[in-house]
Amino acid sequence: MQISRFVLALLAASVLATGCAKQRAPATKAVEAIEHSLADVRDDAAKYAPDGLKGVESQLARLKTSLDAKEYDNVLAGTPQLEKAVASLKDAVESGKQHARAALASAKTEWSTLNTEVPQMVQAIQNRVDELSKKKIRFKVSKDELATAKTDLEWMKSEWAEATAASNAGRITAAAEKAKAIKAKGLEVEKTLGIESRELTASKE
């Protein structure tokens, strides 16, 4: 009786081992396939969908842990969900790329316009500052306002130099953002100094 139980236990263990051996190959291949698929998109995902990448890598790590523990059932059961997650990650990356391309196109258009407007604005402010600095009596612009305008003008020049450098380095989006900030400040200075903005002049024409 004891021998029969022992034999049955051996048979059961043998069957279990055989089943595990059969599952090991497909489980291993499944994990390797997902790793390969993820490798194709990992660099772009790190740039365009970092949160999604983090989630996928966490799921993959859990599957690899199960694989190392010979829990092949868990690996095979979790593979479809992870494959969907990788596919979603690829979609997110493509969406991110499209958004980046659209943003770059918009930035190029903005920069093209601001690259003309801002230098003209800076020069107009410089001319007005020079003009007011020569006057001993100023009725509409106080001494403090003129001093502030001079400080703002120097800031605008410094920022414009950085914007130009960014553009020359191919960082158009950064250049356009700086240029917009400079223009906004310039509009404030023009108002303080009594300079009619180009937008208002253009509308009158």
Image: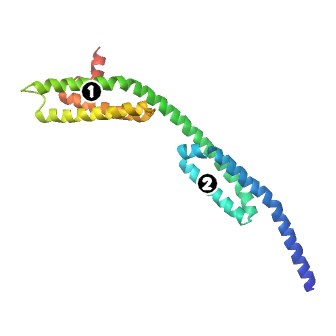
Residue 132: image location, x then y, percent:
13, 26
Sequence order check, earlier mark of 2 and 1: 2
Give the position of the N terminus as an image quadrant: bottom right
Residue nearest the observer in this picture, 39 or 99: 39
Specify few, some or many for label 2: CA neighbours under 10 Å numbering under 14, 14-19, or 20 or more.
some
Query: What residue did someone put label 2 on?
Result: 57
In this view of the protein, can residue 81 be seen by the observer? yes
Secondary structure of residue under mark 1: helix
Give coordinates of residue 193: x percent, y percent.
18, 28
In-front residue for pair 36/13: 36
**Amino acid carrying mark 1 in the image:** Val
Query: Which residue position is annotated with label 1?
Result: 122
Figure quadrant of residue 203: top left
Q: Which of 138 and 154 is in front in this view?
A: 154
Residue located 40% across and 34% down the image: 166
Could you say which disc has been placed on residue 153 in the image?
Answer: none
Above-or-below relation of 184 to 85: above
Residue at mark 2 to residue at mark 1: CA–CA distance: 50 Å
Q: Is residue 180 visible?
A: no
Residue positioned most to the bottom: 2
Which quarter of the rendered picture does the C terminus lie within? top left
